[in-house]
Amino acid sequence: MTDTLAAFLDQHALIHQRFEHPPVFTCEEASRLCPAMPGAETKNLFLCDNKGKRHFLLSMPAENSVDLKALAPILEVKSLRMASPERLLRYLGLTPGAVTLLAAFNDAEHAVEVVIDQALWTADAVLSHPLVNTATLSLPHDSLARFFTLTGHVPRIIDVPQPG
């Protein structure tokens, strides 16, 4: 976790538990290498529209997949694709493997739209990398909701369409 994010969480009394672990780059690695932690495991994707004008930080339960073709009209774009590592670094200050809901902290210009699956949003707590993939934070729902308010992001809560 960056010192700046840690200071932000502490300054605003956002309750969280921190768990250290080896670097993880996929949900499968996380389930194998991370300790048991209280909260819903997440899968986070950084997406952009076909022209690269709109960017989305999508979070859903780790066991889910997303149908990007079905998601595009919900987000009012023609099509969606995974954004490049260069875009990830430019817009969220992250490298692949560290995509996290907490990256909204790095989006001071509000250039990225946060989209969260309904099932994840209603969880008691959510697991999220603290901008690095060598630790995970467990944040109660109230802390996560306050985090978005404090960063000026209004997450769009939807039922993320799954393949099939």
Image (cartoon, grey):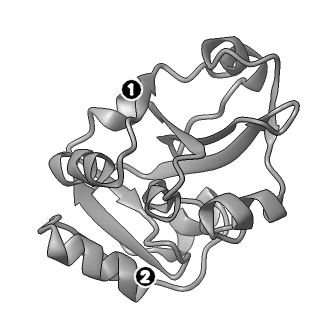
Q: Residue 119 location in percent, x, y?
A: 37, 29
Between 69 and 3, the residue placed more toward the observer is 3
The mark lying in front, picked from 1 and 2, is 2
Q: Which mark is residue 13?
A: none
Horizontal relation, residue 6 to residue 153: left or right:
left
Q: Which residue is farthest left?
A: 13
Identity of the amino acid at label 2?
A: Met
Secondary element type, mark 2: loop
Res. 49 visible in picture: yes
Residue 140 sits above or below residue 53 on the image? below
Res. 36 visible in picture: no
Secondary element type, mark 1: helix
The quadrant of the picture occupied by the N terminus is bottom left
Q: Residue 97 location in percent, x, y?
A: 66, 68
Residue at the disc numbered 1 = 118
Q: Residue 64 location in percent, x, y?
A: 57, 35
Which comes before the other along the chain, label 1 or label 2?
A: 2
Looking at the rendering, which quadrant does residue 58 occupy? top right
Identity of the amino acid at label 1?
A: Gln
Residue at the disc numbered 2 = 1
